[in-house]
């Protein structure tokens, strides 16, 4: 039988499933050295959040087929190392949605009625009713920042309590929000309208510090902030100031920038309720994630695809080798389209060479879709689950093969729909050199590497503009590696693409955008 190593405590229901498909060995609290020895001959490894599955551990796990995380996230697993060794990584992102939503509502109510403070007062022998007058939540506005699975679950419960719900999520359509009875508004409107503000955004580099000094200055007087998502979403020192100055009445927090050693200056404030990241810790949620992880292990060991793969290929190795040169090109087109989009993603259509098989085309469409959805969901996105997540968001997906080469071999075209449609072309030169060759009708020969600044400008023929932009970047210490300029016959606007060596400061971008005739700027990070 398969050896299955369980490194953290999981619910018995999950262990029962694992025992039905293999020989289960439960060994918790192992050091890396002990773990390196224990994983030998293991076909599957199951963890929660404590055990670190590092590259040396994976190297020692010569027979391992799958590492399963019983919970959301895979931050304690070296996914690249697992991928290099051909080991599947799966997690269980859906098992604790209700637990997180219920904890959010619990914190909201506790903050509104001063429950922890009143409890402490009673235990100190006091009877201090006048200082604990709370507020009712019926008829109040709840502002959600992030409207994914947890945000929607919170909205339903808040509506049942008589609250009006508004939400900000740049990746959600108005139609989808309206179907849940929620009004989609801007971030500033959520902050200014919400009597209660609850965070449910995905933690990415772009969303770090999403709620800072500027945002907290916009909240309505007496508002209460709840965060059960990620601590990095909030500038904690700005939050301390807002609470001390009374701009916020209170905050209820389950997550912190540093865990398990949170900012004591913040959690020690009298108008802060703090819990130690227990939003997902219910008996039912622990059963759900354990069962979900165990079922996926059973599927993998039986040769079936898992439900929530993090790094799984879906084609035979021979087919993946055939597509290997095209995958970076498609990813680059996806990153470019994502940067160009204005509004939430509504549709994706891919056209490729007729020499590709239907399976090849479907795989590449999944790559493009996963790239477009990356960072917009609570779940990890890859070619396996991208279509499921797109369907949940009512994104229309199409693919076709075309006999038109338009002057290029191995041409790929993405047509992406949002508030305004975006069309980009890419091609492989000499079969292994990806190039962006057309951006919404502007012809290019752009290597998709590193950072690129796109600038659209009216009156394209006026002299001095390229030099002016170059000076602004040079003064900021930004090196330019290439410049391309393109015009469309049907437009009086030119497009300039500048490849740069380092990130452009926001102030420099504002200066470029303020130059005469500039109608739009956009930065694209193609990666290395």
Image (cartoon, grey):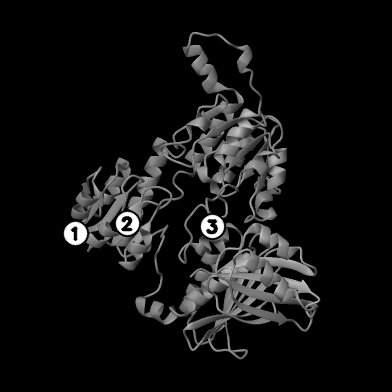
The CA distance from mark 2 to mark 1 is: 13 Å
Question: Is the C-beta separation of discs 3 and 1 under 8 Å?
Answer: no
Q: Position of residue 280 (x, y in %)?
A: 44, 40
Instruction: Judge the density around disc 3: few (<14), some (14-19), many (≥20) Cα neighbours within 10 Å.
Output: some
Residue found at x 41% / y 60%: 309
The CA distance from mark 3 to mark 2 is: 23 Å
Q: Which image quadrant for residue 29?
A: top left
Q: Secondary structure at mark 2?
A: strand
Q: Is residue 423 left or right of residue 280?
A: right
In the image, which disc is placed on residue 375? 3
Residue marked by disc 2: 67
Q: Earlier in the sequence, mark 3 or mark 2?
A: 2
Q: Earlier in the sequence, mark 3 or mark 1?
A: 1
Q: Position of residue 196 (x, y in %)?
A: 64, 35
Q: Secondary structure at mark 1?
A: loop
* 92 or 218, nearer to the observer: 218
Q: Is residue 124 left or right of residue 6?
A: right
Residue marked by disc 1: 41
């Amino acid at each position: 039988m398969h050896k299955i190593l369980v490194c953290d405590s999981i619910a018995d229901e999950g262990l029962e499933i694992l025992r039905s498909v293999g020989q289960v060995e439960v060994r918790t609290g192992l050091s890396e050295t002990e773990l390196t020895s224990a994983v030998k001959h293991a076909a599957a490894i199951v963890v929660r959040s404590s055990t670190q599955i590092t590259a040396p551990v994976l190297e020692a796990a010569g027979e391992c087929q799958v590492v399963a995380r019983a919970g959301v996230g895979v931050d304690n697993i070296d996914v690249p190392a697992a991928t290099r060794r051909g080991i599947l990584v799966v997690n269980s992102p859906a098992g604790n949605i209700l637990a997180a939503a219920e904890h959010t509502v619990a914190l909201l109510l506790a903050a509104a009625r001063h429950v922890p403070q009143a409890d402490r007062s009673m235990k100190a022998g006091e009877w201090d009713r006048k200082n604990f007058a709370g507020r009712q939540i019926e008829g109040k506005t709840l502002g959600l920042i992030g409207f994914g699975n947890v945000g929607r679950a919170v909205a339903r419960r808040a509506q049942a309590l008589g609250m009006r719900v508004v939400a900000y999520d740049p990746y959600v359509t108005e139609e989808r929000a309206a179907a849940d009875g929620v009004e989609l508004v801007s971030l500033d409107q959520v902050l200014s309208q919400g009597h209660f503000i609850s965070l449910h955004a995905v933690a990415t580099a772009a969303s770090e510090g999403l709620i800072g000094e500027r945002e907290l200055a916009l909240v309505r007087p007496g508002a209460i902030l709840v965060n059960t998502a990620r601590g990095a979403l909030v500038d904690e020192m700005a939050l301390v100031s807002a609470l001390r100055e009374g701009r916020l009445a209170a905050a209820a927090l389950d997550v912190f920038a540093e865990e398990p050693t949170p900012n004591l200056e913040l959690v020690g404030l009298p108008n802060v309720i703090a819990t130690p990241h227990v939003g997902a810790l219910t008996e039912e949620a622990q059963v759900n994630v354990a069962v979900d992880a165990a079922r996926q292990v059973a599927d993998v060991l039986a040769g079936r695809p898992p439900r929530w793969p993090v790094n799984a290929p879906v084609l035979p190795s021979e087919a993946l080798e055939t597509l290997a040169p095209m995958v970076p090109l498609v990813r680059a087109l996806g990153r470019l389209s994502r940067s160009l989009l204005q509004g939430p993603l509504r549709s994706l259509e891919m056209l490729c060479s007729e020499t590709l098989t239907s399976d090849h085309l479907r795989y590449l469409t999944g790559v493009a879709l996963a790239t477009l959805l990356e960072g917009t969901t609570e779940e990890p996105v890859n070619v396996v689950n991208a279509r499921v997540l797109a369907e949940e968001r009512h994104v229309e997906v199409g693919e076709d093969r075309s006999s038109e080469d338009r002057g290029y071999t191995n041409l790929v075209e993405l047509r992406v729909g949002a508030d305004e449609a975006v069309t980009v072309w890419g091609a492989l030169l000499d079969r292994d050199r990806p190039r962006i060759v057309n951006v919404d009708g502007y012809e290019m020969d752009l290597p998709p590497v590193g950072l690129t600044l796109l600038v659209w400008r009216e009156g394209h023929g006026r002299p001095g503009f390229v030099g002016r932009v170059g000076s602004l970047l040079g003064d900021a210490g930004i090196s330019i590696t290439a410049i391309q300029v393109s015009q469309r016959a049907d437009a009086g606007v030119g497009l300039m693409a500048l490849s740069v060596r380092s990130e452009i400061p926001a102030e420099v971008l504002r200066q470029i955008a303020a130059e005469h005739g500039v109608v739009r700027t956009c930065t694209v990070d193609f990666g290395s």
